[in-house]
Structures are given as structure tokens and as C-alpha cells.
Amino acid sequence: MNEQIRFDKYERKGAYHWKLFAAGGEYRDYVLGLLDWIPKGVAILDVGAGDGLIASKLGAKGIEFEDTAVRLAVEHGADVIQGDAAALPFGGASFDVVFMGDVIEHLPDPTAALQEARRVLRPGGNLYVTTPPAAVPVRKYHYREYTPTTLRVDVEGCGFVQSGEPFTRHERIHAVFSRAD
């Protein structure tokens, strides 16, 4: 197992997702694409919510490990709490959608987080994942990077079935998985 990687971007950059979104450009387009991709009007959990920008835009509950990010999210009015993706503080079958946007590659134990995502999803619920495609060498702050195939294998190994074909947009793999019941 890799040594714990300290994610210090929020301490160094502040609420940078809010700034990038406000500035327009590619990041704003990415977020707007997520809003079209992920269904509305359902209970959504944003795992690894960071500074809360996407959770806020989705109307989602967010959970984030880094305390500075949680503080920034709350300051921006996002519904984000501090917690661990591998030990979600929610009852089983609590959400219709779990979103992991640019987070799976940051997790020291993605299997535990995926199993927790499955546990909190209602039967028939969906897991939405975005992640940058694998690079050599692995990027700073990442434990592991994925291809569409390795992502499918890892997620399906935790009780999901891929729904449709993954696609790449804004330099991120996008994939949807249904909870296998």
C-alpha cells in the first residue's frame, strides 16, 4: 500500500473550483456537462466533494476528507461534511446517485470506497465516475490512474455493472455504473 498522500491544494489555492467556474472556459464547460449528464431531482451524494462547487450545482450532499476543503465548501453554502469515502456516515440505500468526480484516483483504497458507494445506493441506483485517463508517470496526488477497461474491471468487481459505453470529454473518462442487485 502506498504511503498516505497529503492533498494540500485547498490550503495552497483556496476554493479554486469556484474561481475556475466563475472564470468560464474548459472547467465551466466540464461542470455544465456534468449537470446535463447526471439526473436531477434525485438524492445525490458527491464523494470527494472538495470545495463543494459541483455538489452545490447538483443540489447534492457532499462528503470530503480534507478539512480545509470542507470549510471552503461550507463558506460557499455547499452541503458538505467531513468524512471518509471508505466509511460513509449514511445508512444503506440512502441515495439514488453517487458521484465520484476526479476522486477515485486519489483514494488509497478505492475498493473500500466503491463498496461503500454501493452500500449507500438504493437498488437500481447509479454511480457516476469521472477520472483523468492513465498517464506515465502517475500524476502527483494520485495513487492509481485508469483506462476505461481498468476502471470497469475495478468498479464491476465491487458489485456494479457498467451502463453504456464510457466516453472521454474534457480530458476525463466518464462512466456510469448501475448497482448490481
Image (tube, rainbow, N blue to C red):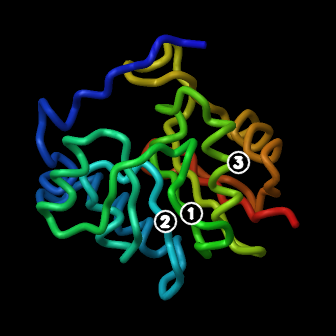
User: What x and y, as percent, mark residue 19?
Assistant: 12, 53
Q: Residue at x 62, y 35 (%)?
A: 110
Q: Earlier in the sequence, mark 2 or mark 3?
A: 2
Report crowding for label 3: few under 14, some 14 to 19, many 20 or more residues within 10 A (C-alpha): some
Q: Earlier in the sequence, mark 1 or mark 3?
A: 1
Which mark is drawn over residue 98? 1
**Pointers 1 and 2 in contact (C-beta within 8 Å):** yes
Amino acid carrying mark 1 in the image = Val
Q: Residue at x 54, y 12 (%)?
A: 2
Of the 4 image quadrants, the one containing the N terminus is top right
User: What x and y, as percent, mark residue 157?
Assistant: 82, 42
Report crowding for label 2: few under 14, some 14 to 19, many 20 or more residues within 10 A (C-alpha): many
Q: Residue at x 12, y 36 (%)?
A: 13
Side of 157 relative to 73 (left or right) = right
Which residue is tagged 3?
Answer: 115
Amino acid carrying mark 3 in the image = Gln
Which mark is drawn over residue 80? none
Spatial distance from mark 2 to mark 3, Cα to Cα?
A: 14 Å
Amino acid carrying mark 2 in the image = Leu
Q: Residue at x 60, y 30 (%)?
A: 109
User: What x and y, as percent, mark residue 180?
Assistant: 84, 62
Which residue is tagged 2?
Answer: 45
Is 60 rendered above or below residue 25?
below
Asked which quadrant contains residue 6, the reply is top left
